[in-house]
Amino acid sequence: MNQINNSVDEMTMRTPIQCSQCSMQSICVPAGLVPSDVEILDKSSREPHLYNKRSVVFSEDRPLTSVFAIKSGSVKCYTIDSNGKQQITSFHLVGDIVGLEALANGKASTYCETLETSMLCEIKLNKLFAQELPKVENNLLQLMSRRLANCSKHYLNIVNTSAEQKVIAFLLSISTHMHQHGLSRNEYRLPMTRTDIANYLGLAVETVSRIFTSLKEESLIDTKQSILTINNLNALERRVA
Amino acid sequence: MNQINNSVDEMTMRTPIQCSQCSMQSICVPAGLVPSDVEILDKSSREPHLYNKRSVVFSEDRPLTSVFAIKSGSVKCYTIDSNGKQQITSFHLVGDIVGLEALANGKASTYCETLETSMLCEIKLNKLFAQELPKVENNLLQLMSRRLANCSKHYLNIVNTSAEQKVIAFLLSISTHMHQHGLSRNEYRLPMTRTDIANYLGLAVETVSRIFTSLKEESLIDTKQSILTINNLNALERRVA
DNA sequence: CCGAATTATTGATCTGGTTCACTATACAAA
DNA sequence: TTTGTATAGTGAACCAGATCAATAATTCGG
């Protein structure tokens, strides 16, 4: 585990914050609620928990009536196909909410596994819905709608682009996410392995590795272990356009 | 236009049915509402309309605060990339609801265009939300959640499968949809062109064409113009497993 | 801090699917 | 009907990315 994340985790453990004071409020489910509503949420639906690296948060086809807000760390969601092969369907970083696909039938449609020590906040939907807070449901709708839009976007990355474009688009999407959460868009840690990236993008590991190398040779990026540095954001953006 | 669809369209035109009597009730937004709620929906949010083939229902980035239920016919959703190239992100058939991705920011994230003469029922969300019907929002949530789950499923079809598996999975997904809507799962009309299918699956038209030919040679399917017949559903399913 | 195990990189070869070029069929308008 | 245009099918050459193989670098448990 890297130091930055550990310190965040420890801090969160020491002083478990309320929804009403949470830094994720603007993007999380309670966003837009009047204070009294947040109190209800605080009492009924919040349950922060620290997960070790490679912990399974929920399993495919198992009952699931919660969503999880990622307060720190990251997860991958994947399914296991009939040949036993893992196929990653999404990565989620700080500030994301996981488990929305389960809402329809109360069963998780993927596995969800932490990529590093992570702090997740469980939001129990049955309790939430029992309160009948239209505002919360509205926020959830917004969230899912955005997720759907993102889904098509990722789809576009996958269809009809070269392997290089896929990898660049992937790096840029993380960069954007980091930026939206007040972190550096030009330097961040890649919590997933090359193998995971390749799996996610539908490429061979070797191809991903070669593309990283060639981007480094062109000085567009740098990597020091899992830290990725973007040297020329514009040039990268131009390549995926 | 084919006869079957025309007759449905005409019938719908002659006797514009209410939400309360609509055959799509069980899958559409009003599902699960008490009768009085459906009445509200009838009055405030419903606006069925007949579209000619190739009509643009909504345009990317344009304000959109409605969703559309497909009562008959079909549509494709697509974006135009920076090079002016169309990229289809989804097809929607009878019984689907389109436009959910726009909910987040009130702007359509894709174009939506009819593939044939189609009857769409516009459901105006602002009016709907003004009523504050938690049940309706709940249904929308269910719908979007299911869509998200489907999204990953389609994603799996695209990543790490051969061209043949992509095409078969595509045909099977339509078959399943037809079956779920009480139509034959072994014989249906493909409302989209080969070019559209290829675009959607990220393949060359020629590849799609060749795969259709080879599946016909193996007697797994038959095609007579746009009518597709599945001769051996199990065999096809085995190939994508 | 060390050794085992996992993960990443690099090179050489091979192939599925694209591309290009062309023909055939379907369909709508005159 | 005929004619023009869009769509579908087929063949041959080529190439991006997969696969196979081997080595280097990291990570992690003790």
Image (cartoon, coloured by chain):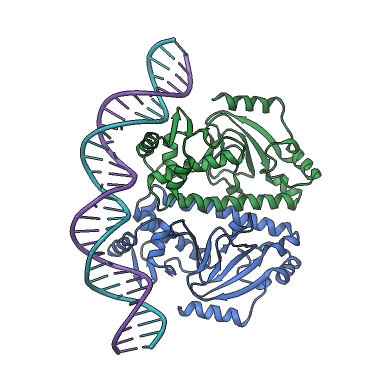
Chain colours: A green, B blue, C cyan, D purple
Query: Residue at image x 53%, y 65%?
Result: B112
Evaluate whether residue A82 shows in this view.
no
Residue A53 placement (x, y as % from top left) = 54, 29
Residue B6 placement (x, y as % from top left) = 51, 79
Query: Residue at image x 70%, y 24%?
Result: A14
Query: In screen coordinates, is A109 left or right of C10?
Result: right
Residue A213 placement (x, y as % from top left) = 37, 34
The one nearer the camera, A5 or A231, is A231
As drawn, the residue found furthest toward the right would be A36
Query: In screen coordinates, is A82 left or right of A138?
Result: left
The one nearer the camera, A51 or A193, is A193
Residue B76 placement (x, y as % from top left) = 49, 64
The one nearer the camera, B57 or A38, is B57
Query: Residue at image x 49%, y 74%?
Result: B53
Snapshot quadrant of residue B119: bottom right
Relative vertical location of residue A91 with respect to residue B84 in this rendering, above or below: above
Query: Residue at image x 60%, y 41%?
Result: A180
